[in-house]
Image (cartoon, rainbow, N blue to C red):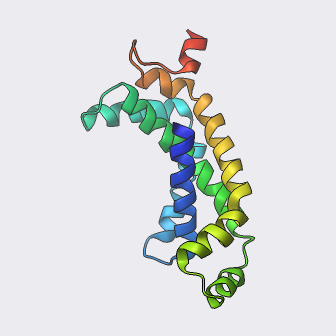
Amino acid sequence: ITTLISTVLGSMASLALYRYEFRGKKLLQALLFPPIAIPWLITGTAMLIFFFGVGIGRGLVAILLGHVALALPYVIVVVSARLQTFAPELEEAARSLGANQWQVTMRVTLPWIMPGVIAGGLFAFAVSFDQFVVSYFLSTPGQTTLPVEIYA
């Protein structure tokens, strides 16, 4: 579930960061790297405190949100790297031939970035599967993940 959510949200975020200019874009891009660089013990502790603070507590929802928050930056970075090689002229050519924005995205942009989307999804899966510390902090006895069961 984490892989699917992270891949879809990360791909959409990458497209938004690529296509649009908005206030705070550089700050948002800079905030993508701390989850990658901060040790997972600190991240897991911070997430546990945060989820109890907002009333979510521990359980399946907390595990899902925690894993998505940790996997999302990996997907965004990988898909954004693939978008850097994209030629905007291809979209312009498709529009000049009568394609609407949906058709341009589905038939031009998405096929171009698909290798990055797949690689980002694989990274999301690997990161989620490797999240023992975060899973251990956020799980309850009845709701655990496979890494917690393996290490238990």
Q: Quadrant of residue 147?
A: top right
3 vs 44: above or below = below
- Residue at 54%, 77% (x, y): give it: 101
The residue nearer to you, when weighing 94 against 143, is 94
Residue 118 x %, y % = 69, 49
**Split into 4 quadrants, where in the image is the C terminus?**
top right
Residue at 64 percent across and 62 percent down: it is 80
Residue at 49% over, 41% down: 68
Instruction: Name the outermost residue toward the front.
Output: 98
Left or right, residue 136 beside residue 53 = right
Relative to 151, does residue 74 appear above or below in the rendering? below
Residue 27: % across, % down: 48, 65
Is residue 24 among the parts visible in the rendering? Answer: yes
Q: Nearer the viewer, residue 62 or 89?
A: 89
Q: Of all residues shown, which one is farthest toward the bottom?
A: 96
Residue 70, how many percent across, how many down? 53, 41
| Direction from residue 45 to residue 101 in the image, left or right | right
Residue 77, compared with residue 45, is above or below; it is: below
Residue appearing at x 65%, y 86% in the figure: 92
